[in-house]
Every structure is written in C-alpha cells, then in structure tokens.
Amino acid sequence: MPTPHLRVMRRLHAPPPPSAWALATLVLAALFLWPVASHAQTAELGGLEQLARDFVAPAMKGSIAPAGEAPLRPEVVVGTLDTRLRLAPCNKVEAHLPTGTRLWGRSRIGLRCVDGPTRWNVFVPVTVKAWGPAWVLRHPVASGATLSQDDAEMAEIDWAEQPASVLASPALWVGRQAAYSLQPGQALRQNMVRAAPAFAAGAMVKVSSAGTGFQVVVTGEAMAPGIEGQPTRVRLPGGKVVSGLVRDAQTVEIDL
C-alpha cells in the first residue's frame, strides 16, 4: 500500500489541465488556419478550371458546322468544379475530351492526373452555344397540319440548344406535316416534321417491278397511307398482297 506521502508526490508530478487561455489559443489557431487551407484549395481548383478553358478553344475547331453560307457564332460557358473536391497533389494534369463526348450543347471537359502519387480524373461542365439563323414559327401549328412558307420566319437561335438538327432550308420542311403540336418561337428541327402521305389507304396506285430488259406495271389498292421512301403494302387484282417502297404519289416499286 502506497503511503499518503507518495500519493501526494504523484499528484504533484501529473500534468496540469489546460487552462482556459490555452484552449482559446487552440481554437483561434484552428479558425485562422482553416481559411488558409480553404483558399489554397480554391486556388488549385481555379487553376484546373483555367486549364479546361484553355483546352476548349482548339478542341472546338471543326466541331461547329456553318449554317448555310454564314458560319455559326460560338459561345462557350465553362462551369466550376465542386469546391468539396480534395485532390491529391499532381505534377502534371492533362485536359481531354471524354470518349463519345461532343462540344455541342451541354458537355464536359475531363481533367486527369498523369504524373502523381495518386491518379485522379474529374470533369468540368461546359455549355457550348452556336448562334446562327434558322426558321422560327410565327404562330401555333396543330399536329398533322401541313407547313407552308408563311408559317415561319428567320431569326437567330442557338443551334446547339437541342440535339435535333435545325432545318435550315425551307425545302426541308415546306409541305411536310407537324409531327406534334408546335408553338410560336420554336425553331424548326428535324424531329418536328414528318413527310406528308403520298396517298391515302384505299387509293389505287401503280405497282412497278423491273428486271433485266423488262418492266411490269399493274394497278392495285393501297392497304395503308403511303409515305414517300417508306415501305407499304398493296393488294393486287388477284388478291395477292405485295410490299414495296413508295416512290411518288402514284407509284409503289417492288423487287421481284
């Protein structure tokens, strides 16, 4: 059993509890050091974002096609990285375009560490706009209605706003039908129109077939509306049903 004298000596040699002043000093140090680390991380991310900006301009060469005779006017908006990212130190960072990615509309630029103790790969969001003239609807067009030249007028739009191709020439949409209800201000795009039927179901059409040195033409009844360039079925006078491609408003071509 230790004597009371020894217990007193052990208490005298024990480390004293931290004072209120010492605790306050530690807290203030943490508060001052945290912004320094945060600013350093922000500066690092800012450098990576600048690397992405420097990569975009040369990478876009040839990616924006002209709108008819006038070239499209590009506009690029480079986003920011997530400030919560904590990336390992890297001696060399390489910008790249991810496989299958196109600099058109909403896209992204990859940044990967190619020389460092820990390899990493992050992505910076990029929005690429391509301004140019296009045909824009003047008024609503009902689904199935046939479009005419008076339905649209020229205006500048962002071609890259949607993935569907812009119909830059009236020949691509005049005489075609609206694929769905269209609204004023919409630019005419490929997915908004469809070919008008060359003939209706029940119409009498010519069925043409040809071979080496001969051609056969008979008349039959269309079993469905015919769309130019698309297959349809025709019932011949003897009752036989054949399939062929619609060539025009009066002719269906079949292979023997």
Image (spheres, rainbow, N blue to C red):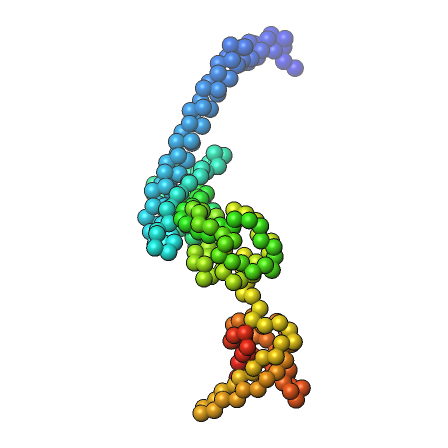
Residue 140 placed where, x, y %? 58, 50
Can residue 122 be spotted in the picture? no
Q: Is residue 223 above or below residue 64?
A: below
Which quadrant does the N terminus fall into? top right
View extreme (right): residue: 239
From the top left corner, tell me how far across and down residue 92 is, in percent.
34, 43
Residue extending farthest to the bottom is 213
Please tell me in which quadrant of the rendered image residue 118 appears.
top left
Residue extending farthest front: 150
Q: Residue at x 42, y 31 (%)?
A: 42
In the figure, 88 relative to 213: above or below?
Answer: above
Instruction: Identify the residue at horizontal 35%, vertical 51% (top origin).
Output: 71
Lateral position of residue 101 relative to residue 191, left or right: left
Q: As rendered, which of 255 and 133 lies closer to the eye? A: 133
Specify whether 11 is left or right of 75. right
Looking at the image, is 168 positioned above or below residue 109?
below
How far across and down, in percent of the image, does residue 181 sit? Answer: 60, 53
**What residue appears at the point 40 percent right and 43 percent down from the top-left corner?**
76
- Residue 243 in which image quadrant: bottom right
Question: What is the total number of numbered labels drawn onto the structure image?
Answer: 0
Please state which of residues 126 and 134 is positioned toward the viewer in this rendering: 134
Is residue 239 among the parts visible in the rendering?
yes
Q: Residue 170 or 80: which is nearer the viewer?
A: 170
Q: Residue at x 56, y 60 (%)?
A: 146
Q: How far across and how far down the image is residue 207, in percent?
A: 56, 83
